[in-house]
Amino acid sequence: MTTSMLIAYDGSDIAEDALRAATALLNAQKVEIITAWEPAARTTARAVSFTGSHQPTIAQEDDPAYDYALETCRKGIALAESLGLSAHAHVVEINSTVGQAIVEAAKELNVDVIVSGTRGISGVRSWFNSSTAENVVQNAHCPVFVVPNNQG
């Protein structure tokens, strides 16, 4: 019996499907919903560095990326509550990859299982897209419940 789970929630239909599947199949008493975010200044600096242009200084106050992540996480909480769960929201900053942020949050929150959806990219496209779910499976300290993309 699962007592606590972390649900990686990015607001996508895939994340919603994963949340619904986990609710139906896992018996969790404690639910942690996390949304990972990267500061807009870091995203902009990385994009500008590829061009070789001067990197502008961007203020971190009132970061729209954080605001978006917080709103996304709140939507995840609302969905969880509509499914009868009592969940806690966490917005975690990405320091390396989304997968690593999820794994670190799971360790910190001491959950029994991590829930993640997957885009299900295969073939040549998969060579150019890193899989967050695969990264989580390879680095997690606990079981990972991966819900495949049944959208397409």
Image (tube, helix red, strand yellow):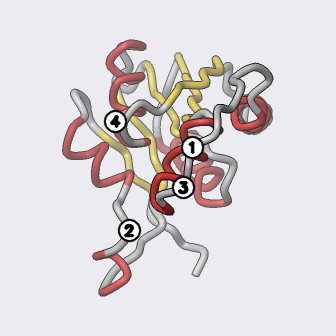
The type of residue carrying mark 2 is: Asn
Which mark is in front, 2 or 3?
A: 3
Mark 4: few/some/many CA within 10 Å (<14, 14-19, 20+): some
Nearest to N terminus: mark 2 or mark 4: 4
Q: Is disc 2 placed on a helix, strand or loop? A: loop
Left or right placement of residue 5 versus residue 68 in this view: left
State the separation of the CA atoms marked 1 and 4.
26 Å
Q: Residue at x 51, y 68 (%)?
A: 149
Measured as percent of width and height from the top left, residue 94 is found at 47, 33
Quarter of image, res 37: top right
The type of residue carrying mark 1 is: Gln
Q: Label 2: which residue?
A: 129
Q: Label 3: which residue?
A: 53
Q: Label 1: which residue?
A: 55
Q: Is disc 1 placed on a helix, strand or loop? A: loop
Mark 2: few/some/many CA within 10 Å (<14, 14-19, 20+): few
State the separation of the CA atoms marked 2 and 3.
26 Å
State the separation of the CA atoms marked 3 and 4.
29 Å
Q: Which mark is residue 100?
A: 4
Nearest to N terminus: mark 3 or mark 4: 3
Q: Are marks 3 and 1 in contact (CB under 8 Å)?
A: yes
**Residue 49 or residue 71, whichever sits in front:** 49
Q: Which quadrant of the rendered structure holds the N terminus?
A: top left
Direction front: furthest residue:
54
Residue 52 position (above or below residue 127): above
Quarter of image, res 89: top right
**Residue 142 or residue 43, whichever sits in front:** 43
Measured as percent of width and height from the top left, residue 102 is found at 41, 33
Q: Are marks 1 and 4 in contact (CB under 8 Å)?
A: no
Q: Residue at x 54, y 44 (%)?
A: 45
